[in-house]
Amino acid sequence: MILKGRGLSKGTGEANLIVSSEPVSFLGGVDAKSGRIIDERSDVFGESIAGKVFAFPSGKGSTVGSYVLYGLVINDCAPVAILNERSEVVVTVGVIISGIPLVDCLDLSLLRTGDMVEVNGDEGSVNVEGVEEVHVVTSFLENEGKILLLKRSELVGTYQGMWAGISGYLEKGDEAVERAVIEIEEEVGISSPRLLKEGKPVSSRDENTLWVVHPFLFHVDSPKVKLDWEHKEHKWIPQSQIPEFETVPRLIKAFEAVVQGLRHEDGER
Amino acid sequence: MELLIALGDIYDATRLIPVTSVHISGASYKTIGDAGLKFLSEICKGCHTKAKSTVNPIGMDRERYEEMKVTEEFVSKQKEIIDHYKSLGVLDSWTCTPYLIGNRPGLGEDIAWAESSAVVFANSVLGARTNREGGPSALASSITGLTPDYGLHREDNRKGNALFELDFELEEKDFASLGSFAGEICGTRTPYFRNLSASEDNLKTLSAALASSGSVSMFHVEGLTPEWKLGYEEDCEKVTVERKDLEEIANSWNTNDSPNLIAFGCPHCSTAELKRIADMLRDGWKGPELWVCTSREACRKAPDSVQEIDKQGKVLCDTCVIVSSVEDFSETVATNSGKASTYLPSLCKQKTMFDDMETLIRRFQ
């Protein structure tokens, strides 16, 4: 899979990834002579970032941190590249003077320690080897203010027994919204639903798969549904109750994305 | 200049603006090492400051380094660093509290400061405008007299965006814990404190702690700091601070109760603090080694206090406990500083004991 961010410091590098979920102060956090993480409160305490790609949300703490980054390079124990959610000046200054590639504006929840990644600081891209990107559509149906959730059967390949929207794989060449309409007809027997909203795709990582969910919200005139083999139960619920169900990963995020998404005024699809 | 333009590009600045004041971090041989020394030797050659510039503490007192048990190599490398900075024409400062020694910009002035605690103090208490510069970018601003115009140089970005309400009176030591508590929650955001009364020394403590647990650059205190009327974003996170939140943090800083060293002055002591310490020490001292770190300028202004403290402990100038080589002779440091309590375990391999100045002095007296 390829993640797109913003290239802040130029250059390229390829190495195994080490991911921390906490902001880092390079001064007091990383030993400039060995590249080891020395902050006992860090979730990667004791690990070495030398020769690795180091991902952490943001910099923090001392403004001398820039010199620690420079020192890592001089002492030959620097990370090959740095990945951030949002850049912070002390780290940015440090990587620029040291020539370490840095890409920010990334969703670090999609990365795992041990991933082999190829970072391109010129283009702001990160290629994660061996992780396959799979696109799916997920549709939420609305009737009289309630939202339809379906419980996945034991016959489906993934996430059996969990609650979900109406989903299906997006094949190459498929128009997402058309695929969504086809799946609705197949899975709940409703034709001609009215498209209300389309959300920005939501990504989530599950081992070596990157799921990219394209969320839609449709209105249907009747609450009657006819389930096929993929589901064994359905419920119409107020949207506030979604968190109470055991759902497939990031269903709530997909729903939130669709709520904030583009409104379709014409309603004809 | 290239570094400043690169930063400007990244953060969407459309221009570079002149600065009236610069404060540079990265002066202790302990923290910047041979790599930093090499960097300075390349950058400082043939350059001169274009704006009033002060520099952060170094790893030793320039006059009393022999009493600090530093190695000869350390002394010689440290002196090289000093010489590089001096060749630029910086003020003879070596303090993290430039605002106490005459580098004190006023409301609305554009400046370029590094040293995380001083950045927060300058923005919040003085109302001057600076982003949180890294040591090298502050150095670049000193040489060029310029900084990219983005972030906190623009009034739109100076509003609070996390509200902290207090419903109890703070004691002196609580300012450190409050800073650490709010800094961790805020990350890069600007906290707005409601119902807080504080002295300038309290705000100095708060600034340092905010900047060590997070990357806060500025705060407001309702009714107190110069730009509090900018207010806070209506839809921002709202936090009610409880006494137990602060106690939890203070407890985490208490990992040993038999210190080899008691250290005050992180950030550097003001003359008022020197006087308080001196007054308490008149009642005698039986405790362990005592370091009171401050600027040489504050020392000059408070000779009586310094003399009194020196009878019982050491007043050290130009340096502070976290950038010194304290680990060479100590395992536990007692301090009243949240910033020192945060950095001592990782940077100096120390256990810490934390309390306010008076409690610590009275306990070991």
Image (tube, coloured by chain):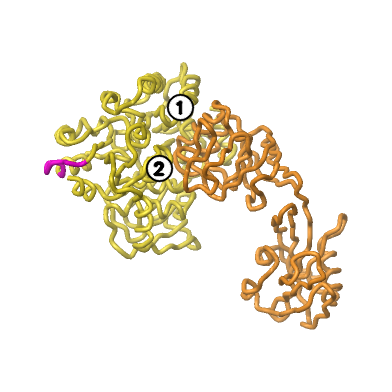
Tell me the magenta residue range. Answer: B280-287
What is chain B's hue in the picture? yellow
**How many numbered marks, from 0 up?**
2
In depth, the one of B5 and A184 nearer the eye is A184
For this view, does A205 lie left or right of residue B242?
right
Check residue A86 in the rendering and tell me which mark sits there, or answer none.
none
**Is-magenta flag for residue B143?**
no
**Label 2: chain?**
B
Marks 2, 1: nearer the viewer: 2
- Residue B28 at x, y percent in the picture: 39, 29
**B87 over B231 or under it: above or below:** above
The residue nearer to you, when weighing A25 against B273, is A25
Amino acid type for the residue under numbered disc 2: Pro
The residues bearing labels 2 and 1 have C-alpha atoms spaced at a distance of 19 Å
Q: Is residue B103 left or right of residue B9?
A: left
Tag 1 or tag 2, which sits nearer the N-term?
Answer: 1
Which residue position holds label 1? B33
Q: Quadrant of residue A186?
A: bottom right
According to the picture, the residue beneath numbered tag 2 turns out to be B345
Type of amino acid under label 1: Gly
Q: Is residue B208 visible?
A: no
Crowdedness of circle 2 by 10 Å Cα count: few (<14), some, many (20+)?
Answer: many
Q: Residue at x 42, y 38 (%)?
A: B347
Q: Residue at x 38, y 60 (%)?
A: B245
Q: Quadrant of residue B70?
A: top left
Q: Residue furthest left?
A: B283
Q: Seen from this angle, which residue lies furthest top?
A: B46
